[in-house]
Image (tube, coloured by chain):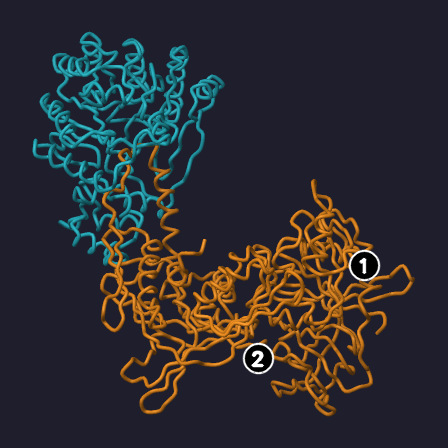
């Protein structure tokens, strides 16, 4: 166990996390540059394009240190967005230390801080690493100053590297061995292994990534997931090298995979504890939280004929995404589809993009909603996450919406603007705490509906990216709720309806009409957009019709060019859904939620 | 493959020379007239090279550029070569574009004597300020003289080009120009809305903010009033920008572009179409001459049109013409029943007065022609 190090790299976006990971992999000889696929850890297209890691992964690096001993360095990659902050926390819980990577040119940035705060929560050894020292005109002294004052770390502990040029990599590997503590734990104890990731393999079923804290696990063991209370027989255990590498056992302190005939990823809960069925550990490892969808939206195929394909795609997609839930749904305006639950708006975005890209579908999402609670006059309590099922004011005794406690960490100069933002978002019961010089921790209780839609973007913008944000759902609170309907050319489009706070209804209605006016392209006829509450029109906007749109000349040389232009325009329109006689683009359904203050 | 069987091919000859570039024009042309002689030689070579692919034509169109820059001997040589290389059927429509700035009665008589029976005069406007804004070399008096001379020279098929929608032009001002044009009793009128194209002098002036773009509503108004005014004078509005005193005077040549009739285009940047293939020449006079002197065709590129492409072109071109789209013919050519695939949309157009459906043909109204591109993009 003394020869194991479990660590993660944390960094602001684009500070070079993936490049450094690649360097470490190459340096330890796991593969050479010829067989090396760029940025192997982020192996999904979307991750590479967005520069964020969605699913964490592990790689075990064999390393012979200068002390002459052989080590196994387990590099655990983490996702980088608040929608996945729980997954990040489970990955970090599996580590003893982190490399905190800082871009030499950009210095300490928002997520540098946010990630540092997370690492501190887990009591991890932190090694600051200044990357990109090959860039011209970098001010290392300035970055060192930031490490001391902004991060509160000892600047003498820093390392320098250029991941791109392969400079300073040896020093990093040595520091990982020397400074990050070896894991502790007792192989002779009862088994306790933390699940921090799971993904689906078409041949082997679910591949579980775990960190063994106590005991030993091997093929043939009968294991129990302590929270899910399900029992499986272990088929195979091993390490993650570039591919899976089978081992006889995983022992306390080690990180690896388990294959145990688990059919779907949904049967596994991230953060759950694996123990032996016969000799269970006395209690689960701490920090477990059930990943519950908090944002709901319906997905429809743009072409109604594609429903069967969508059904198949959603089912397959679900195999690899435990946090995603779905059930059948149908809309008057958009036809048959699925009501789905997501961890947040980014998660929703990712699901949409993956369904479109990996399954080649064109889909429309309805306006996202949180799950509201209504107590009816007859005493029944119903949860409503789809505005279509809004019970109506006459039948409702009491309406409630979910509240969260938001924890925000930021340099203190942003406190004022963030408090204003929170108040605007109906925040109450604030609490301010100063954990160190220049840093402030602010908590607020806010309606989830206000937070999920555009809070995070605005928070990032007002703190210029220097704030970190996380939230927990706390309870349901009474709230005056009404249903805001949107009518397009007099026809109600149910997928654009929202349940909103009564005091905000008018403003939301105006906003929605304005947004739709911007999003829905001009068409052959005038389009009237109206916002309505209970039949009363509260807002309206009009999109004027095309009146003159034709080129004057179209002779021999113009025809090909013109046809190609039309083909391009038509392609753009494939991402629109015909609602009555109006084509509504995909983007319109999300846009109604975004406030004007977004950029 | 769709082989068009409804008409004989047309021959287009592009003369890419201009004395000066007009402010609105983004057609390919050069003011370097020193190349004209070698260019004409090359045109003859290019014609030769198509002897076996095209056998007969029932239209010839000399366009540009400024074909009237050529000496009458040069024009004659081109026509003679065409007559030797191909069969030009009796009664063929033979058109030349002329610029009032460099065409006198004598020229016009010579042109008429060669068998050119249709003349298209680039008048553009009868207002001196507008002519200077457009960068034309002639004034309104010259334009009127050319029109009179053409008639006296014997032409009974005269067309003229006008441009409208100039900055600060009012509809009344435009109608006055139109009245002057109609007073000559031309057989054909092309009225083009001024387009602010990038890389033209006028486009650049617009980008610099010298004047603004007209609202769609104003553009619509100009278009509809133009159509009404000319139709009231007894003309047929047979294509977005084209009017004829009767369908027998509608440009036989230009209509070939719009219904997939084959055509051969000679000269730099000219396009040709045959079978389901469209190809086009290189744009520069230099490359054009070099290629032909080396014995190769100066073709820049080509495309084979599949059924989808042909169908899409038929749709957007049909919406530009009074002739419209024959639903049955469309179905038999492309296997697409428009009323089945987009019946709701088409009925919507009909309700809004953008099209009429008569005798199984979708016919755009003037209001529909004004938005033909938007309709075609559905």
Chain containing the residue with disc 1: A
Residue drawn at (41%, 71%), measured in percent from left and top?
A: A369
The correct choice, above or below, for A526 with respect to B219 in the image is below
| C-alpha gap between disc 1 and disc 2 | 35 Å
The residue tagged 1 is A173
The residue tagged 2 is A290
Mark 1 vs mark 2: which is more N-terminal?
1
Q: Residue furthest right?
A: A68
Tag 1 secondary structure: helix
The quarter of the displayed image where residue A471 is located: bottom right
Q: Colour of chain A?
A: orange
Where in the figure is residue A291, as x and y percent of width and height? 56, 76
Other-residue count near label 1 (Cα within 10 Å), few / some / many at <14 / 14–19 / ≥20: some
Residue drawn at (82%, 55%), measured in percent from left and top?
A: A171
Q: Which chain is the one coloured cyan?
A: B
The correct choice, above or below, for B238 with respect to A371 in the image is above
Classify residue B84 as left or right of residue A67.
left
Chain containing the residue with disc 2: A
Tag 2 secondary structure: loop
Q: Nearer the viewer, residue B160 or A585?
A: A585
Q: Which quadrant is the N terminus of chain B positioned in?
A: top left
Disc 1 with disc 2 on a shared chain: yes
Q: Residue furthest top?
A: B106
The quarter of the displayed image where residue B87 is located: top left
Classify residue A344 as left or right of residue A192.
left
């Amino acid at each position: 166990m003394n020869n194991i190090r479990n660590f993660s790299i944390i960094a602001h976006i684009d500070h070079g996390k993936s490049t450094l990971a690649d360097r470490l992999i190459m340096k330890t000889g796991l593969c050479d540059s010829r067989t090396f696929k760029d940025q192997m850890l982020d192996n999904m297209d979307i991750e590479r394009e967005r520069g964020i890691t969605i699913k964490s992964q592990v790689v075990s690096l064999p390393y012979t240190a200068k002390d002459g001993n052989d080590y196994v360095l387990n590099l655990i990659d983490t996702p980088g967005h608040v929608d996945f902050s729980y997954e990040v926390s489970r990955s970090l819980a599996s580590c003893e230390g982190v490399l905190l990577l800082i871009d030499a040119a950009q210095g300490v940035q928002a997520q540098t801080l946010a990630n540092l705060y997370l690492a501190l929560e887990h009591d991890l050894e932190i090694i600051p690493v200044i990357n990109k020292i090959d860039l011209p005109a970098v001010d290392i002294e300035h970055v060192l100053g930031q490490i001391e004052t902004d991060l509160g770390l000892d600047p003498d502990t820093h390392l320098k590297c250029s991941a791109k040029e392969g400079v300073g990599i040896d020093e990093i590997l040595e520091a990982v061995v020397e400074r990050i503590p070896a894991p502790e734990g007792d192989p002779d104890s009862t088994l306790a292994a933390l699940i921090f990731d799971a993904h689906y393999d078409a041949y082997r079923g679910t591949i579980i990534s775990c960190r063994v804290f106590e005991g030993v696990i091997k093929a043939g063991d009968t294991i129990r997931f302590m929270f899910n209370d399900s029992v499986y027989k272990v088929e195979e255990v091993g390490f993650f090298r570039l591919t899976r590498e089978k081992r006889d056992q995983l022992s306390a302190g080690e990180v690896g995979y388990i294959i145990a005939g688990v059919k779907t990823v949904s049967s596994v809960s991230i953060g759950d504890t694996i123990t032996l069925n016969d000799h269970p550990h006395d209690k689960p490892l701490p920090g477990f939280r059930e990943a519950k969808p908090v944002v709901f939206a319906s997905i429809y195929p743009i072409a109604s004929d594609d429903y069967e394909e969508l059904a198949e795609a959603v089912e397959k997609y679900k195999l690899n995404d435990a946090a995603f839930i779905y059930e059948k749904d149908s809309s008057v305006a958009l036809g048959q589809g699925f009501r789905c639950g997501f961890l947040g708006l980014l998660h929703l975005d990712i699901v949409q993009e993956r369904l479109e890209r990996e399954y080649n579908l064109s889909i429309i999402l309805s306006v996202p909603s949180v799950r509201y609670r209504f107590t009816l006059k007859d005493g029944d309590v119903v949860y409503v996450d789809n505005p279509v099922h809004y019970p109506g004011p006459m039948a409702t005794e009491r309406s409630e919406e979910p509240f969260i406690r938001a924890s925000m960490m930021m340099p203190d100069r942003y406190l004022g603007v963030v408090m204003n933002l929170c108040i605007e978002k109906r925040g109450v019961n604030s609490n301010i705490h100063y954990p160190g010089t220049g840093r402030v921790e602010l908590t607020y209780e806010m309606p989830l509906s206000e937070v999920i839609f555009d809070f995070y973007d605005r928070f990032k913008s007002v703190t210029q990216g220097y704030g970190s944000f996380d939230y927990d759902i706390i309870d349901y609170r009474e709230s005056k709720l009404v249903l805001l309907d949107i009518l397009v050319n007099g026809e109600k489009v149910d997928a654009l309806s929202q349940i909103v706070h009564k005091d905000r209804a008018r403003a939301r209605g105006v906003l929605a009409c304005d947004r739709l006016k911007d999003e829905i392209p001009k068409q052959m006829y005038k389009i009237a957009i109206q916002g309505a509450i209970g039949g009363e029109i509260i807002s309206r906007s009009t999109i004027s019709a095309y009146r003159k749109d034709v080129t004057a000349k179209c002779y021999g040389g113009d025809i090909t060019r013109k046809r190609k232009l039309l083909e391009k325009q038509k392609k753009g329109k494939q991402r629109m859904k015909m609602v009555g006689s109006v084509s509504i683009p995909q983007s319109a359904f999300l846009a109604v939620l975004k406030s004007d203050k977004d950029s | 493959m769709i082989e068009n069987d409804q008409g004989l091919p047309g021959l287009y000859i592009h003369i890419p020379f201009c004395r000066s570039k007009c402010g609105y024009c983004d057609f390919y042309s050069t003011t370097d007239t020193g190349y004209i002689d070698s260019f004409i030689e090359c045109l003859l070579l290019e014609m030769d090279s198509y002897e076996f692919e095209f056998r007969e034509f029932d239209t010839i169109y000399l366009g540009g550029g400024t074909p009237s820059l050529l000496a009458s001997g040069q024009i004659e040589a081109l026509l003679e070569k065409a007559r030797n290389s191909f069969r030009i059927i009796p009664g063929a429509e033979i058109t030349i574009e002329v610029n009032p700035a460099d065409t006198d009665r004598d020229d016009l008589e010579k042109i008429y004597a060669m068998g050119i029976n249709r003349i298209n005069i680039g008048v553009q406007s009868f207002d001196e300020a507008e002519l200077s804004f457009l960068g034309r070399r002639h004034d309104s008096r010259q334009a009127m003289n050319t029109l009179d001379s053409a008639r006296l020279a014997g032409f009974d098929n005269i067309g003229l080009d006008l441009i409208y929608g100039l900055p600060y032009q009012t509809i009344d001002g435009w109608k006055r120009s139109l009245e002057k044009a109609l007073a000559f009793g031309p057989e054909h009128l092309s009225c083009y809305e001024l387009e602010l194209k990038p890389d033209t002098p006028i486009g650049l002036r617009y980008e610099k903010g010298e004047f603004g773009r007209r609202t769609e509503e104003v553009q619509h108004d100009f278009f509809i009033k133009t159509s009404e005014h000319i139709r009231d004078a007894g003309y047929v509005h047979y294509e977005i920008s084209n009017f004829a005193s009767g369908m027998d005077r509608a440009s036989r040549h230009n209509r070939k572009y719009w219904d997939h009739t084959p055509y051969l285009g000679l000269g730099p940047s000219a396009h040709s179409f045959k079978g389901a293939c469209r190809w086009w020449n290189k744009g520069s006079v230099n490359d054009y001459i070099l290629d032909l002197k080396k014995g190769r065709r100066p073709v820049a590129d080509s495309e084979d049109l599949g059924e989808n492409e042909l169908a899409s072109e038929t749709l957007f071109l049909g919406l530009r013409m009074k002739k419209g789209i024959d639903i049955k013919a469309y179905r038999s050519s492309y296997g697409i029943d428009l009323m089945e695939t987009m019946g709701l949309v088409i009925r919507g157009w009909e309700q809004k007065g953008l099209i009429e459906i008569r005798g199984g043909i979708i016919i755009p109204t003037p209001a529909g022609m004004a938005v033909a591109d938007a309709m075609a993009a559905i």
